[in-house]
Amino acid sequence: MATTGLQDSPEQKSRSCSVKHYGSTDSSGEHEHQSNSHGNNHQFPAASAGHWIGADPGEEALRRKLKYFFMSPCDKYHAKGRKPFKLGLQLLKIIIVTAQLVLFGLSNQVVATFKEENTMTFKHLFLKDYDESSDDSFAAYTQSDVYEHIFYAVEQYLALPETTVGRYAYVYDVGVNGSALSLCQQYYKKGSIDPANDTFIIDPHISTDCVGVNPLSVPPSSLSRSYKNFTLKFHKLVNVTIEFQLKAINIQTIINNEIPDCYTFYIMIVLDNKAHSGKVKIRLENEALIKECKDPSVSGQASNYSRVAFDIVVALVCMVSLLLCGRSILRGITLQQEFVQFFKETLDRKVGWADRLEFINGWYILLIISDILTITGSVIKVGIEAKNMSSYDLCGILLGTSTLLVWVGVIRYLTFFQKYNILIITLRVALPNVIRFCLCVAVIYLGYCFCGWIVLGPYHVKFRSLSMVSECLFSLINGDDMFVTFAGMQESSTLVWLFSQVYLYTFISLFIYMVLSLFIALITGAYETIKHQTHEPIHITDLQAFIAECTDAPSSGKFRGLETSPCSFFCCCDRTTTYEDVLLVN
């Protein structure tokens, strides 16, 4: 019998608990591995008095199953002649999922651009003297200014067909009293404030008064000019809202060979006076509802169902991938139980959790999650293409995340090459220490976040909320906006300014010069450990030692046993007693 087996690379030897490429090459290295391990005082797990020597055929069959399970797709092809169809399926999935994401991204970009441009148009149309540079500080400071902004917005709405260059249509019967536009004010039910005597009387319950306005294109009614008599109760005013709807059609989707979408914009202009600080903040909010147009007709183009068909193909491919990965996990669990039972009954020993987890392939779990996200995103995308749904954001998140996971899964196939496997080993070795280190650092980071929010929030725009504080501090760690952050505290009080200097200098010094350096040292230390570990003793687990006893090379022909019963393409369970029926497909 030819003696062929393993030749371990330095990267493979550096792994302390998991070896996933048994049976990759010549087995002469396997015998050398065993002899070297004895020389380094490594003891292979033994049955009773010695090694697994003179094992029965059932034990040898189990070894071959395990060895076949940890082979690469190429070795499995040499072992049984089965083409790596799952590898080909994953490569196909990478291509079509990426193509689907690109197509969706182009459509989503058109939709997002149309919404943003219309929102900007509405601000210039309905907000008096609007300036993009003063969007966050746009406000009114006198009663006359408030009335002017209200009347300007309503009058611009009524004159919309004559003023706008876009094509918009009114939506009727959506406001109060069946009107098209609702002008409302909210105020405290009872409010009396007397700063001269330092007294006030407030009933916090909110009351609302509204008037309806209809465009002049309909028969004149009492609603048309009722807004002119709208009186505001400034002494207890909370806010003023102007709500209406407009319809539009996005015809630029024809560029992507898509049927144009029909939009309904829900527009609300808010004059906010909650603070009663003398500054009435003004903002415009716009939400869009997308639906299918009635009787669409595009000259020279027929209905295009190719995108829907492509999405269905992507969903079917991902469904096949999901079934195959699920089958492999189930078969791995079955083989794990067989291995554990063998150790318990034959050797009267327990298998450790490290060896048990070797049968659960984390890459398959990642692919299953990716497939579920892709299938869900494809269903939503089909609904969007059919104009029955408008969840562009949710669909983008699902497809984007699934594509990310699919491309991350490519790393699995790079691990079959010894020189690329060093990255995965480094991450695997360094990850536990990195997680523990990050937990310790997170405590300090959160402390700085809360402190900065409470102390500096009232005086610095970058510390107004916890999320903004976290973003600012993370930018400081990476060396961004340092001068701007320091300069923003110049106008604050002397005590707060001194505190801010201590706060910022200590944070920057601690996290840049210590935390980041230690973080990089953890990764570097793991990499150096792996590089030099080939000269140190190697820990051999029970599973590795048991598989190492099998000296059959993939091309030896001993993995090509006769199958007494054919197995279906999607079968998950064994139906015969021959060992070939329970071999795992990687």
Image: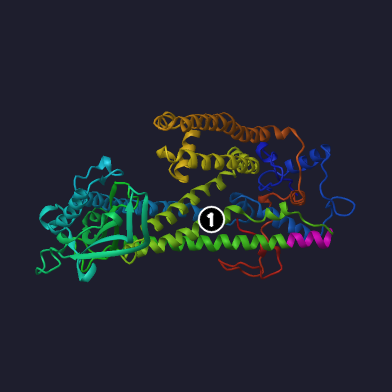
- Residue 122 placement, left or right of 380: left
- Depth order, front residue of 192/507: 192
The answer to which quarter of the image holds residue 328 is bottom right
x, y (%) of residue 485? 43, 32
Q: Is residue 431 above or below residue 317?
A: above
Which residue appears farthest toward the right when viewing the image? Answer: 49
Q: Main secondary structure of the magenta part?
A: helix
Report the residue at 54% width, 64% height from top.
Answer: 323
* Viewer can see residue 299: no
Disc 1 residue crowd, few under 14, some 14–19, many 20+, Cα 10 Å: many
x, y (%) of residue 463? 44, 40
Report the residue at 60% width, 53% height from top.
Answer: 362
Residue of label 1: 367
Quadrant location, the C terminus = bottom right
Q: Is residue 154 above or below residue 33?
A: below
- Depth order, front residue of 438/576: 438
Colour option used: rainbow
Which residue appears farthest toward the front when viewing the image? Answer: 197
* Magenta span contains residue 376: no
Q: Give amino acid for label 1.
A: Leu
x, y (%) of residue 66? 70, 55
* Magenta span contains residue 340: yes
Q: How many marks?
A: 1
The answer to which quarter of the image holds residue 481 is top left
Q: Which residues are magenta?
A: 338-347
- Residue 120 placement, left or right of 358: left
- Depth order, front residue of 93/363: 363
- Depth order, front residue of 521/141: 141
x, y (%) of residue 543? 74, 52
Please, what secondary structure does the residue beneath circle 1 have? helix
